Amino acid sequence: MTRVRGVRGALLVSTADGLVVAEQLMEDVKGAALAALAASLANRLGRAMTAAGIGASVFWHLQCSEGALLVVPAPSGVLVVAIAEPEVNVGLARLELLRAAELVG
Amino acid sequence: MSDDVKSLSAELAQDPQSLVFLRLGEMLRQRGQLDAAHRVAVNGLERHPHLADAHDLLARVLADKRDYERAFDEWDMTLRIAPSHIGALKGLAFLYFKVGDVAQAVAHLEAAQREAPDEPGLAQAVSLVRGGNPAAAARGLGFEGTAAPPPPAAPPAPLEDARVFAGLEGAQEGLLLLDASGQVLGGALRDPSGKDVTAPVAAYLAGVSQEAARTAKLVGLGSWTGLAAEGGVGHVYVTQVTPQTLLLVVRDRAIPMGRLAIIAQRAAQAAARWLERLARRRARASSIS
């Protein structure tokens, strides 16, 4: 994932408890806190999407003024998370995340 | 194929840059040949992307095909190119009327009247719209084609709610405006089976804004501007209208995510205007009391 241009770091997060499974992040990013918040956001979003009848989340993208957080939930309950620069190719990063989620299982 | 259509088609084939496509497209539309009219309008727009009449033609065809969201986009574009375009003003009046926003419908018709005071039918359309006669008003506005819209089946939503997303497709099934505590301010959501799911979705989304803001700040990404999510059946886009209000747009998977963001942007602008009006009204009420 981190080989994709514009991706600054990536981590795997357990959705159920918000703990880091694996990470490759910049030194200044608090992986544990990010994992907890990403899992909480994923759970909240997942419940809203299920209630709306549009199925579970396949990919989500938090767009920010100075970059983005890209997330793919893997079937095993692990979130594949990438932190990206504003100029990242979201389509390419999405494909890589989906591939990583497949590998994670 | 009639002689007129044949002759215009031949003229267009001979000179593809010709503006005759406007007459041909309108003729096909009036005859109910909507797919053919759509092709003619789209081809014409490809050659004349800055021609207001071409956008107006496409909008009329889309309105007849009941693709009101895209019709709104095209008339909106028409007015950006030609701010006093009569066809677009009438078209938007028609769409506003369809969603129950009589005030906006009348405002657009009156703007059209100011531009073309002698145009027959406009004054009558205003009174028909005010009188709540949808079929006659649609005819007065020139939308009596093959698919004249039926009158609303259900009673219109309360005026304040109906106005939030006036003119936007999905105003009562795929657009939702919430406050920070998950209270619904406007719009509504229905699941693919038609069941109203507004309340549970609103409840789950309460707090998303704060969590998104905390996450973005923690990672040094600045402020969050939108949250786009793909589901198995549909797509979702969440954005802030103000720091205290959240907008949710839901569409099926056929709508690409990029387009969803544009729909959300437009809905957010409508919601911001509505919130401003509401704030002004409340300020006036409190100053009177």
Image: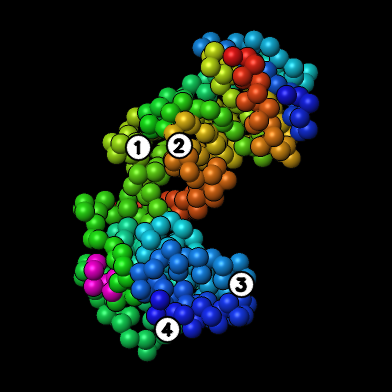
Q: Does B161 appear above or below B32?
A: above
Cα separation, mark 4 vs mark 3, equals 26 Å
Q: Are marks 1 and 2 in contact (CB under 8 Å)?
A: yes
Q: Are marks 4 and 3 in contact (CB under 8 Å)?
A: no
Disc 3 is attached to a residue of which chain? B
* Amino acid on which disc 3 is placed: His
Instruction: State the image coordinates of residue B186 (x, y, percent, origin top left).
Output: 36, 45
Q: Which residue is mark 3?
A: B48
- Is residue B130 something one can see in this rendering? no
Nearer-the-camera pick, B18 or B123: B18
Q: Nearer the viewer, mark 2 or mark 4?
A: 4
**Sequence-wise, which precedes: disc 2 or disc 4?**
4
Magenta stretch: helix, strand or loop mostly:
helix
* Amino acid on which disc 1 is placed: Pro
* Amino acid on which disc 2 is placed: Gly
> Which numbered tag is attached to residue B45?
none
Cα separation, mark 3 vs mark 1, equals 38 Å
At a point 60% along the width and 80% down the height, the residue shown is B14
Query: Are dots 4 and 3 on a single chain?
Result: yes
Q: Which residue is mark 1?
A: B192
**Sequence-wise, which precedes: disc 4 or disc 3?**
4
Query: Are dots 4 and 1 on a single chain?
Result: yes
Q: Nearer the viewer, mark 4 or mark 1?
A: 4
Highlighted range, magenta: B134-139
**Sequence-wise, which precedes: disc 3 or disc 1?**
3
> Which numbered tag is attached to residue B3?
4
Neighbor class of circle 4 (other Cα within 10 Å; few <14, some 14-19, many 20+) is few
